Amino acid sequence: QVQLVESGGGLVQAGGSLRLSCAASGRTFNSYVMGWFRQALGKEREFVGALRWNGGSTYRSYSADSVKGRFTIFGDNAKNTVYLQMNSLKPEDTAVYYCAAGVTYGSNLNDYDYWGQGTQVTVSS
């Protein structure tokens, strides 16, 4: 079992930055793939990016095309935490952002077994 708690959401102006955190419980944290998703009001939940540990403190990550170049995922294995750094935010980035854990390094909702409660990000124009 893995429990995930997101934090760091809030209100920011367009062009600004936010860093979301996802703190995970469980002794096998680095055996999971960690994903970030978002869901805007009235829309389906969409993939933002994912991180996979290579062993120890190293990892690889990638972002969806819609946020590539603006959003970066990185992790701190010692803190059992994964981060989503969001730069150059746009009003269309407004959504509830979710952290998820699974065993498949993928972009589908079904790739992930555990989900956090979500954190709201609102970008004003």
Image (cartoon, rainbow, N blue to C red):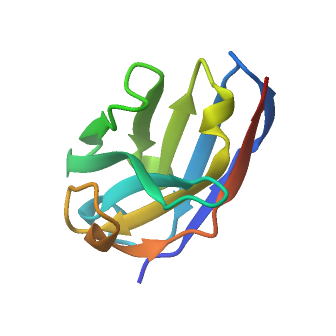
Left/right of residue 100 with respect to residue 41 in the rendered view: left
Percent position of residue 91, x then y: 69, 30
Find residue 43 and report its image quarter.
Answer: bottom right
| Residue 114 on image: x %, y % | 43, 75
Examine the rendering and report whether any part of residue 6 can be seen: yes
Residue name at image x 65 percent, y 49 percent? 95
Task: Tell me, yes or no, if residue 55 can be seen here.
Answer: no
Answer with left or right where residue 52 lies relative to residue 101.
left
Quadrant housing residue 12: top right
Outermost residue to the bottom: 1
User: Where does the C terminus fall, quadrant-wise?
Assistant: top right
Q: How many marks?
A: 0
Residue at 43% of width from left, 54% of height from top?
46
What percent of the width, then of the height, locates residue 6? 63, 57
Relative side of 15 to 88, left or right: right
Quarter of the picture containing the N terminus is bottom left
Q: Is residue 63 above or below residue 45?
A: above
